[in-house]
Amino acid sequence: FCDWRDPEGSSKRLKRTPISPSDDIATVSIHGGDQHDPGHGAIFPPITTATTFVQENLGEGGAFCYSRVANPTRKAYETALADVEGGTYCTATASGMAAVGLALELLPAGTHAIVMTGVYGGTHRLFEKVRRSSMQMDFTYTNLNDLNTVCQNIRDNTRMIWVESPTNPLLELVDIAALVDAVRNFEREKNRTGERILICADNTFATAWNQRPLRLGVDIVMLSTSKYIGGHSDMTGGALITSDAALSDRLNFLKSAVGGIAAPFEAYLALRGLKTLAIRMERQCSNALKVAQFLEKHPSVSEVYYPLLDSNPQVELCRRQMRSGGAVVTARIKAMAGKTEVETLRHFFAGLRYWVLAESLGGVESTINHSASMSHGSMSKEERAAVGVHDTTLRLSVGIESVDDLIRDLDHALKP
């Protein structure tokens, strides 16, 4: 073998100034954060399963002491995800709901939160069936685009506004920048003392590829990373990201105290998925628009929800705030002649080849969620109806398959 060492000595290293860091998601999702391997220079951070780390002497610990507090694999993933979302700090949790729960730990007991109507059923369940009793919290659900109503609902003990945009499953958008401006102006006008109202945005459906809520002024971004970040339906996780130093310190304490952190293998899978986020989202969102346009014209479909359709009342907001309409399409199918709604649904699902009936979303494969029995199954029929989720409401998570095959499959399944 040739010896390519510097003849003047291998200890000498040529140093040059690199180009400035990129802000493009396609690049940041691959190179963001601190992913270097100090041990062997591995191109991808190794999975460190150790629970504890050797300390040289008393008071001479290194960067890691115990994996609940910090872990090399999780750190590589967290720093990369923080960069992708445009934040400075990220804590990775065991699930998306663990992330929602951790965000609520920032609040004292007995506080009030304002929540976007039509949020994910699991979020609604945690708020109503857990935190109302365990933390004596109160929640007001309203359209966060109605800024006057939002401000009218702010109380002395209001400490959080929970944004979900797009919502699950009807894909309603919140004008995030307008909401932030209205809330901050209200605080200034009323001379509110004490802690400001935290604005937390669930960015699961959009991901940073479509929008970066931190740059629109929110305090915290929440993600269920089981979806588009992992991207392959093979891991469960969540995350909270912020660029506020005080919130970072508080979350760093709370994540260790509560302990609902992501395991090393889950962090590894999520980081691996993150690398292809941009290319997956580009294909999935492109496919979703074509699926939505097909369903909108289909005689067996009564309603289609997709923010980038020309017929959607929020299409201009979508174009201004997001890169695309996202990779989820929601539709309501008509009951077939001589069939009940349940019989129609069973007929439809039996006719599919590529689309599959399944919980969750965001994987490379195309899935359909029956919202009434799955994502919003914890809500009563009356509660579902109030937010527009009916027994024939279907949430389609569009994958990366050939869009022609996906449309052909749907067309076949919708036939009587």
Image (cartoon, rainbow, N blue to C red):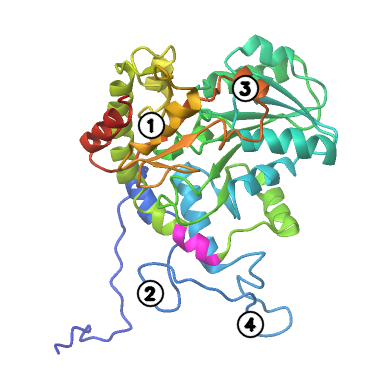
The residue where tag 1 is placed is 348
Kindly indicate whether the residue at mark 2 contacts the one at mark 4 (C-beta within 8 angstroms).
no
* Residue closest to the eye, 22 or 343: 343
Residue 326 found in image quarter: top left
Q: Position of residue 156 (x, y in %)?
A: 82, 22
Q: Earlier in the sequence, mark 1 or mark 3?
A: 3
Q: Is residue 260 above or below residue 154?
A: below
The residue where tag 2 is placed is 41
Residue 368: which numbered mark, if any?
Answer: none
Q: Nearer the viewer, mark 1 or mark 3?
A: 1
Residue 61 in the figure: left or right of residue 76: right
Residue 195 in the figure: left or right of residue 412: right
Element class at badge 4: loop
Q: Which amino acid type is marked by label 1?
A: Phe
Element class at badge 3: loop
| Crowdedness near tag 4: few (<14), some (14–19) or many (≥20) residues, C-alpha within 10 Å | few
Q: Nearer the viewer, mark 3 or mark 4?
A: 3
Q: Earlier in the sequence, mark 2 or mark 3?
A: 2
Is residue 268 covered in magenta? Answer: yes
The overriding secondary structure of the stretch rendered in magenta is helix
CA gap between label 1 and label 3 equals 29 Å
CA gap between label 2 and label 1 equals 52 Å
The residue where tag 4 is placed is 54
Residue 285 in the figure: left or right of residue 5: right
Q: Please report the bounds of the magenta region as a residue range.
A: 264-269
